[in-house]
Image (spheres, grey):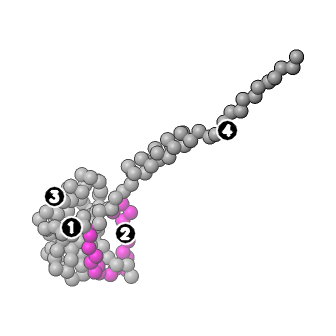
Amino acid sequence: MARKVRVEEEDAAIDMTPMLDIVFIMLIFFIVTTVFVKEAGIEVNKPGASQAIMPKNANIFIAITEDGNVWMDKREIDVDSVRANLERLLAEQPSDVVIVQADEKAEYGVVIEVMDQIKSAGIDRISIAAKGS
């Protein structure tokens, strides 16, 4: 009597669950560690400089227009509210340097007032933006 051997075919499918778990974890990691740059929201005519460099960890920009208007986080603000707005941005994303983008025809007094507000918010490193030549 011959025995019939039953061979059950197994599905040769690849289990995708571990790979999807890893991709999902990587996505969460990159979202959490992404640095968001807080741009000023307006383009100004910066003065030129031959030794202009961009700090690597700069992510907060404050722009001062020719008319003396101050822009921060894509909206126009009052000079006296720079500190409060900067403290709010620093609470969201800590930074040790702020870049001031002053128009080359901006009033010197407004630039100094903004820099004073930045210092009072606890930032000691202030960079002035310039065009590289």
**Which residue is label 3 attached to?**
84
**Which residue is label 2 attached to?**
54
Image quadrant containing the C terminus: bottom left
**Which residue is label 1 attached to?**
75
Give, as a three-letter code, the residue at label 1.
Arg
What crowding class fits label 4: few (fewer than 14 Cα within 10 Å), some (14-19), or many (20 or more)?
A: few
| Residue 50 sits inside the magenta stretch | yes
Left or right of 111, for residue 10: right
Give, as a three-letter code, the residue at label 2.
Met
Give, as a three-letter code, the residue at label 3.
Ala
**SS category of the residue bearing label 2:** loop
Q: Residue at x 43, y 51 (%)?
A: 30
Real-space Cα distance between discs 4 and 2? 54 Å
**Which residue is label 4 attached to?**
12
Q: Earlier in the sequence, mark 2 or mark 3?
A: 2
Q: Quadrant of residue 129?
A: bottom left
Q: Residue furthest top?
A: 1
Give, as a three-letter code, the residue at label 4.
Ala
The one nearer the camera, 60 or 76, is: 76
Q: Which callout, 3 or 4, points to the residue nearer the camera?
A: 4
Question: Could you tell me residue 40's position as x and y percent?
Answer: 26, 68
Question: Could you tell me residue 120's position as x and y percent?
Answer: 16, 59
Q: Are marks 2 and 1 in contact (CB under 8 Å)?
A: no
The one nearer the camera, 90 or 19, is: 19
